[in-house]
Amino acid sequence: MRASEPKVRIGVFFCACHEEISRGLDMVSLRQYAAELPDVVMTGGCEALCTKEGQKSIENAINEHKLDRIVVAGCSPRVYEDIVGRALVTAGLNRYMFDMANIREQCVWPHRDKKKATEKAKLLVAAAVARASVLEPLHGARIGMKRAALVLGGGVAGMQAAIDIADGGNQVYLVEATDRLGGRTYRLSTTFPTQECKPDGCCIHYCRECILTPKLEDVLQHPRITVFMNSKLVDFKGVFGNYTAKVKTPSGEQELEIGVVVVATGSKTVDPSRLPEFCHGMSKDVVTFLELEEMLVESRKSDCELHRPSDGTLPKTINFIQCVGSRDTTGRGKAHCSLVCCTYAIGQAKELKRRYPEARIFIHYIDLRGPYRGFEEHYRDAREMGIQFVRGRVAEVAKEKAGITVVGEDIDTGKLLRIKSDLVVLAVGQEAAEGTEKLSGLFRIPLDTDGFFREYNPAFDMMKRKGISIIGCAAGPKGIRYSVQDAKAAAASLNEFLKSGEVPVQPIRAQVDEGRCSGCRQCESLCPAGAIVMKRVHDKKSDTTRWVAFVNPSQCVSCGACAMACPSKSITLSHYKLNQLLSQLDALT
Amino acid sequence: MDTVSVDVKGGDFNAALSGALSILLENKTVDALLIPQEMPHGGNVVQTLVRKRSGLKGAAPINFVMPMNSSKLLVQLSETQPDEKIAAVLRPCELRAAVELVKLNQINRDSILFIGVDCAGTLKMKEYEKRARELKKAGKSPSAELAKESLTAMRNACQACENFWPFEGTADLVVAHIGVGPGGGLFIEGTSARGKEALKVLKDGGLKEAAIPDSRKAAIEKRKAAAADFRKKWYEDARKRLGSLEEWLNEFSTCIRCYNCRDACPICYCKECIFDSDYMKPSPKALLRKALKRGLIKMPQDTLLFHITRLNHMVTSCVKCGMCEEACPNDLPVAMLFAAMAENVQRLFEYVPGRDAKEALPLSTFKEKELEEVGGH
Amino acid sequence: MTEAKEFEPKIVGFVCNWCTYTGADLAGVSRFQYPSNFIPIRVMCTGAVDPMYVVKAFLEGADGVLIGGCHPGDCHYQTGNYKARRRATILKSLLKELGLDEKRLWVRWISASEGKKFAETVTEMTEELRKMGPSKFREEWDV
């Protein structure tokens, strides 16, 4: 025998919407119909429920008739849901205890026939009343947050993020895989736009030491930054605000309790041996741009001259080849553009032209792309210096008895080119760093088709929902300036969370009834936000442990896929449960 | 070589096979065997959990009746961190269901050694009971005798079955007898790393290496063709008897909502079925209101909804074992309905349940580029 | 003169909050007229539409059911409509084999800006269902 259900007391409020609604419907018949619906104890009406008077009338009615939930028949919930919720809160009810019947946008306005519109309005109100009668109060939550951040990667982006977060009063753990901070920037001889290094070897504060050292000192001396060198993240568990990261360091494994994560693992360059037509590895005089940087750095230590790797002579003809492994359609490189190669190639070409004004320098390109301010001047400078820009793909770098020959074409003149070269510099593209896939699995953040972490998506804002921010080249190729900007923006946002000490959890989210869950993982496999994980529970009665689903509350995006897929409805989306949906069907048919 | 032959003396293949498998028990390769046995009373064969050799006297791993799909027992026996190892003797449809249950995280694959056995088909339980009791009275072994006949009274599900031998790579050990035995000979093949290890134990225990004769392949093809013929007719029958609302209502008027079909189905794994939950039990008030609206309502409600919902939930993994129909007290054509529906739906996704433990369940995955005709223009 | 009582099909629509429901709102704002036979049920995403709801709608007497969502690739939750696609396909196959008129189940991708398309879809669906006649479930009580 079932106990009598607690009495539900519904008030139905009709908004005339300044006659927009009321003139299109037989309001008398409609109100009468509503008054006779089950669980409805009163009906009310007013000119406009979105006004102060309108809301007051609802509050008064709630108190007078002791309503525990309401239905508002008026405009689309997409427009005024929040206002109705607020009125409920003012009247002392939970803000989710209402449903709306859209009798304006989806009734009066598209149906001019008053009789037909009224018939439909009745059904819409009946469905809303039926749903309202089975709604439950919903509450958000606040999860406490650990005031500590994990920064993965000690390049320019990682270092900046670490400094900014630590300056915000929070503990930072910076984990670096190599034995040195600075990332790829450390391997550069100079950086754009300050690519001026005097040929006589005189330091003018624009080399990597001078750019990086102040930041390095900031990081290493900061009281709230702990640096782990030669270390890797091996495990990661928990929820936003309370993560446990396991880091493998040379002296053993460490477990770190953190609230947020910054992923600054950077990118790596494409290995040119994947494109053997460019002869890298087969001729000593074919180098990548990074190798050229290292040669320039080394040269400062000796005679400041750039010597050919093969025979030590000074190069007289230098060819730069762009897009090696970028914008590649053959499948051996990457399909995307790596953003920074045109800029640095021009920089390197200018540097060499300055040292060796008599040298012939060619840059073979497909398109010239410069996303940075100052690029135009940079490029014009290069042309004025006599650097030759050749638009056309290079077919190969041929190793011949006489030396290496660049075989390409000049699209603008239509000529095929064979240029004997003393030095060839390949602008190798950027691709996702080693271990990106593993991290994607640990953090449950998807990768995009190029293999980088998927960029910001407003629906799944990983930073707001998971407290995990992807910055710098880990999110796609970019230069130093944008990487550092990324870092500053991420740090500022994360600092807000860290300062508040809590993670807000929204009320409408998926929840698991662990007693009924069979642990089949269908929900886990379909969750678009990766918010569901399996956890072990111990059943005291039967002394068995089993797997059940667990929803990371801040991560749930409320899409309802899990609830749809669960055959037993052990996982449900609050406010959209099976009975709340079926009740509407009951009323409609 | 990864196969051994089992010496069958006096045509008693079950004694030979259980003798061979008991080596795994003695050697402690496994701590227990889940193996079918002829029941001492009446006429039936049930699974038993055996830990001592002495318990294998009535073992009948090759038999002709199927009271339940044993993969359900494996769910009960499955542990995430097992202290003891179990080997389970399974028919192909039980093995296929077990593979699906592994994908549904209900069975821990690592905790059980799967022994898949070729299947010659099964009789309906009442039919088997009658024959078995007669044969036992005459002092004969039901399995041995029935093995000599070509069973024409097999269950529909068995006559239509085209997957009557273990799918490659899904079991650890395969017992092959179609086209060669069982009275004439048996072979055991190790088809996984664990299976090959177990086979080594069998070899050390005296079983000789021998290749499975090609006659098995030919016999399989022949039976497959016959099954395909039967299946076509069976599904045409299904379409005639269940192809319209009126016909369905005619056939299912005696569904009494006992849920036996659901309980017998290995793929129905839910801890509490939605139909047992409060969601599907409207309040007296709601029922009275509905009856007022309609004039009358059937009590209990939602019979067609139950069957369609069960279809929606499990049809992609239906292994067509037919236990549902055997369990129905009113002999409703549930197996016919579900097998025919499963055929179409599984073909849509080119999915064969139980074929590969690494193949994702159609309902747990999706592709960006597929089903582009859905959604109209 | 007696008015021929024309059959008015009853259509239930499971429409996603972000696209089709908003598209329906836009149809109203633009005053596009469409038949009043359509009653919307607002869901967060078509990926949340359990085929059970669709079947229940038919069993309760709906002559047609519409599942309306974002265009594939544009789902607010990335992949909801891909899930809906598979389930709608399975359900249609089941309905077809059972002779339950799978043509009464429509799936349409209508975005928030396609108010006109929404109105046209409902109009088209109403007319098609009118031709098909009332659902058989309306008369049978022993389902």
Image (cartoon, coloured by chain):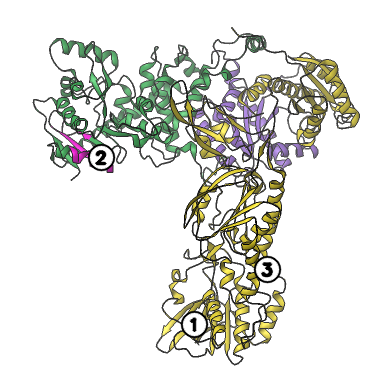
Identify residue type, mark 1: Val
**Foreground residue among A25 and A451:** A451
Boundaries of the magenta span: B175-201
Q: Nearer the viewer, mark 1 or mark 2?
A: 2
Q: Chain of mark 3?
A: A
Q: CA distance from mark 1 to mark 2?
A: 59 Å
Q: For the residue labelled by badge 1, is the local secondary structure a helix, a strand or a loop?
A: strand
For the image, the number of numbered tags is 3
Q: Residues within 10 Å of mark 1 (few under 14, many from 20)?
A: many
Chain that is coloured green in the picture? B
Up/down of A405 relative to B259, above or below: below
Sooner in the amino-acid sequence: mark 1 or mark 3: 3
Between residue A111 and residue B218, name the one nearer to us: B218
Decide: is C76 above or below A67: below
Task: Tell me the element at label 2.
Answer: helix
Q: What is the residue that sits farthest to the bottom in this orientation?
A: A358
Residue drawn at (29%, 17%), measured in percent from left and top? B124
The amino acid type found where label 2 is placed reads Gly
Q: Position of residue A92 (x, y in %)?
A: 80, 24
